Image (spheres, rainbow, N blue to C red):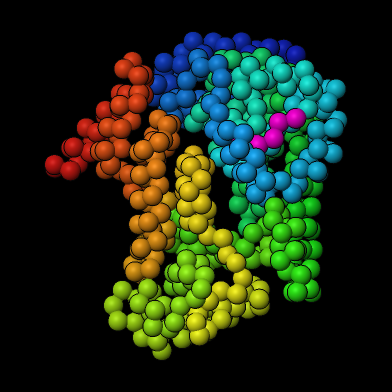
């Protein structure tokens, strides 16, 4: 079969031919930088396309180690709060424990490719440290190029990468299988589960094994959410202790960043809100003490808002929330939320206060409700964007600044790109792209 989805059986004639062609392809990597990936023959299509993305993202195949994205304190704090922490017992039972004497490693990463847990065969763990396949390292395509964890996230599908198919040359002795992990309620990608090792890591049965484990873990996460939601409803007087116990299972959250319509999740159930309801909850989240009708009107409507119009809108919002969770229905006099919602914009601000700039940038998917003209939303949007930009300019790495430069709000940010040039070594291959971007800005602004 031409351009198969999965690599041939390791050790077979087809498998040996695949490795020979992949090694030959590495001698032609300059073609990728010239934008002609079709000239590299013999690669599976998904690998060839991943190599192209890797080259476009300026991943360097000759750097032996993956970059460390989080230090120990950041990592501990981040994974303690991450939803995948709740399913680690399932992963350990089904994958980690059987791998200890099998020459395999099991890694669980977040939705942007940072490894949060790496466990398995102790000997292999020590070997993997040489290429920084460790907890806290960034294994996204942007950082290390083609690998099972990064490419599975890029394509949102199960992936096997065999030996020399890896973009980074130091990873050629390894093979890996990875499967994305989806939120059982919203369907959003929460992370990735990966098996890494020698040729056995891409054996035909490995994909089925990892997919079955992920399915079991997703089902377990859903069950635990439902159980905790029921406990909250049945015993409201113990809500605080139950909430603490369920901290890693779910949070009542509000996704505002880069979205015109917010995504609200309460007690494991998720709903997409209208633009106006998104604005109301964004404002109320930023004012936990509540707002009077006049104050909420002033923050919600750009002109002269009518309390009558606001009341009608609140009636509609209450109906939506009543179906989602009766306990979340907003109170009045003042208008306030009876349950704690964690907006993603608040997560960004919290990370910035702790100096965790890289985590803040990963959470930041774009401006807060970018099309909203509600004064309260505009104020929140500008505050989050300003604090993130200033934090990165004062203490951000080159990679963080370049990632920020990809955001729509940074399209014409000359100061940001000049800051990148100051940090880059004189002979860095990344300088050319930054200079070209500055020339683009000059051309577009003076046209």
Q: Is residue 232 left or right of residue 364?
A: right
Q: Residue at x 58, y 65 (%)?
A: 341
Q: Is residue 215 left or right of residue 185?
A: right
Q: Is residue 52 magenta?
A: no
The count of marks equals 0
Tell me which corner region of the image, top left, top right, bottom left or bottom right, holds residue 438: top left
Q: Horizontal and vertical percent for residue 415? A: 26, 38
In this rendering, does residue 222 appear at all? no
In this rendering, does residue 74 appear at all? yes
Q: Is residue 174 left or right of residue 98?
A: left
Q: Is residue 399 above or below residue 232?
A: above
Between 140 and 250, the residue placed more toward the observer is 250
Quadrant for the N terminus, please. top right
Q: Horizontal and vertical percent for residue 338? A: 60, 75
Q: Residue at x 71, y 31 (%)?
A: 118
Between 168 and 75, the residue placed more toward the observer is 75
Q: Residue at x 31, y 17 (%)?
A: 426
Between 50 and 136, the residue placed more toward the observer is 136
Outermost residue, bottom side: 308
Q: Is residue 116 magenta?
A: yes
Q: Residue at x 30, y 81 (%)?
A: 304
Q: Horizontal and vertical percent for residue 121? A: 79, 23
Q: Is residue 140 above or below residue 102?
A: below
The prevailing secondary structure element of the residues shown in magenta is: strand
Q: Is residue 433 above or below residue 191?
A: above
Q: Horizontal and vertical percent for residue 282? A: 47, 66
Quadrant for the C terminus, please. top left
> Bounds of the magenta span?
114-119
Between 8 and 431, the residue placed more toward the observer is 431
């Amino acid at each position: 079969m031409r351009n198969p989805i999965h690599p041939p059986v390791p050790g077979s004639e087809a498998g040996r031919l695949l490795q020979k062609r992949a090694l030959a392809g590495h001698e032609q990597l300059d073609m990728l930088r010239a934008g002609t990936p079709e000239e590299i023959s013999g690669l599976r299509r998904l690998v060839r396309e991943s190599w192209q993305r890797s080259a476009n993202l300026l991943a360097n195949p000759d750097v032996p180690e993956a970059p460390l994205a989080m230090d120990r304190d950041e990592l501990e704090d981040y994974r303690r709060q991450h939803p995948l922490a709740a399913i680690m017992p399932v992963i350990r039972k089904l994958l980690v424990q059987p791998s200890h004497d099998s020459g395999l490693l099991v890694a669980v990463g977040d939705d942007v490719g940072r490894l949060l847990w790496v466990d398995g065969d102790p000997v292999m763990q020590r070997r993997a440290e040489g290429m920084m396949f460790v907890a806290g390292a960034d294994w996204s395509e942007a950082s290390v190029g083609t690998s099972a964890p990064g490419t599975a996230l890029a394509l949102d599908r199960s992936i096997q990468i065999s030996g020399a198919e890896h973009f980074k040359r130091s990873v050629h002795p390894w093979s890996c299988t990875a499967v994305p992990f989806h939120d059982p309620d919203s369907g959003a990608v929460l992370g990735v589960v990966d098996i890494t090792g020698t040729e056995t890591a891409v054996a035909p049965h490995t994909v089925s094994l990892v997919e079955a484990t992920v399915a079991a873990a997703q089902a377990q996460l859903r069950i635990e959410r439902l159980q905790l939601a029921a406990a909250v409803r049945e015993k409201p007087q113990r809500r605080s202790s139950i909430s603490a116990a369920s901290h890693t299972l779910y949070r009542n959250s509000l996704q505002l960043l880069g979205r015109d319509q917010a995504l609200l999740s309460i007690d494991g159930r998720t709903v997409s809100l209208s633009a106006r309801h998104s604005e109301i909850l964004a404002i109320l989240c930023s004012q936990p003490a509540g707002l009077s009708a006049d104050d909420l009107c002033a923050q919600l409507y750009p002109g002269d808002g009518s309390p009558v119009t606001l009341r009608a809108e609140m009636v509609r919002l209450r109906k939506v929330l009543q179906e989602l969770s009766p306990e979340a229905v907003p109170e009045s006099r003042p208008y306030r939320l009876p349950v704690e919602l964690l907006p993603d914009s608040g997560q960004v601000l919290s990370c910035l206060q702790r100096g965790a700039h890289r985590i803040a940038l990963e959470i930041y998917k774009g401006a807060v409700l970018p099309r909203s003209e509600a004064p309260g939303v505009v104020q929140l949007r500008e505050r989050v964007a300003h604090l993130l930009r200033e934090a990165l300019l004062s203490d951000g790495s080159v990679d963080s600044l370049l990632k920020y430069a990809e955001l729509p709000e940074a399209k014409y940010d000359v100061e940001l790109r000049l800051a990148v040039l100051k940090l880059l070594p004189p002979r860095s291959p990344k300088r050319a792209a930054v200079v070209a971007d500055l020339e683009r800005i000059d051309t577009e602004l003076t046209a």
